[in-house]
Amino acid sequence: MRGALSRYRILAWITGLWLLVLTGEMVYKYLLLEDSSTAPHWLFYIGQVHGLFYMLYLVFTIDLGIKARWKPVTTLLTCLAGTIPFLSFVFEHWRTRDVKAAFDL
């Protein structure tokens, strides 16, 4: 259980940080620039990196959900937390607290 929780926590933070970077990139590209086609090409990779980490986050969240015997709704909401800025940090705190209390970690 400790390993599953640790993997989930690490990926929740990485996913949350990359989502914040992606949000900043989108604000810059679509709100600050007059023409989004003038944005540097490398900005494209920010979304790709976040997508990769989000997929890993989903795998580790489902793994922890199965091991902790979460209800399907709890697992689904925790999975969706990686799509809203700052929410993965909040859910990581809540789920860590719950799992540590339930399994005496």
Image (cartoon, rainbow, N blue to C red):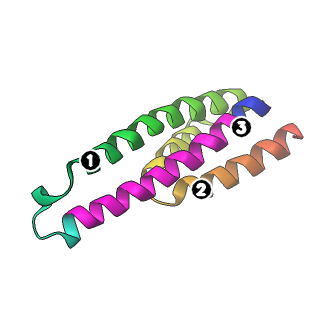
Q: Secondary structure beneath disc 3?
A: helix
Q: Earlier in the sequence, mark 3 or mark 2?
A: 3
The stretch drawn in magenta includes residue 12: yes
Q: Earlier in the sequence, mark 3 or mark 1?
A: 3
Left or right of residue 65, residue 37 in this image: left
| Residue named by callout 2 | 89
3D distance between C-alphas at marks 3 and 1 = 31 Å
Is residue 1 magenta-colored?
Answer: no
**Above/below status of 1 relative to 82:** above
Specify the label residue 6 is tagged with.
3
Disc 1, SS: helix
The total of numbered circles placed on residues is: 3
Q: Which residues are magenta?
A: 6-29
Of marks 3 and 1, the one in the foreground: 1
Q: Is residue 84 visible?
A: no
| Relative to 55, residue 9 above or below | below
Alpha carbon separation for disc pair 3 and 2: 14 Å
Residue picked out by circle 1: 42
In the picture as drawn, the residue positioned furthest to the right comes out as 104
Task: Report which quarter residue 21 is drawn in.
Answer: bottom left
Q: Position of residue 11 (x, y in %)?
A: 58, 41
- In the image, residue 72 above or below residue 94: above
Residue depicted at 12% across the width and 59% down the height: 38
**Is any atom of residue 87 visible in this view?**
yes
What amino acid type should be assigned to the residue bearing mark 1? Trp
Quarter of the N terminus within the rendering: top right
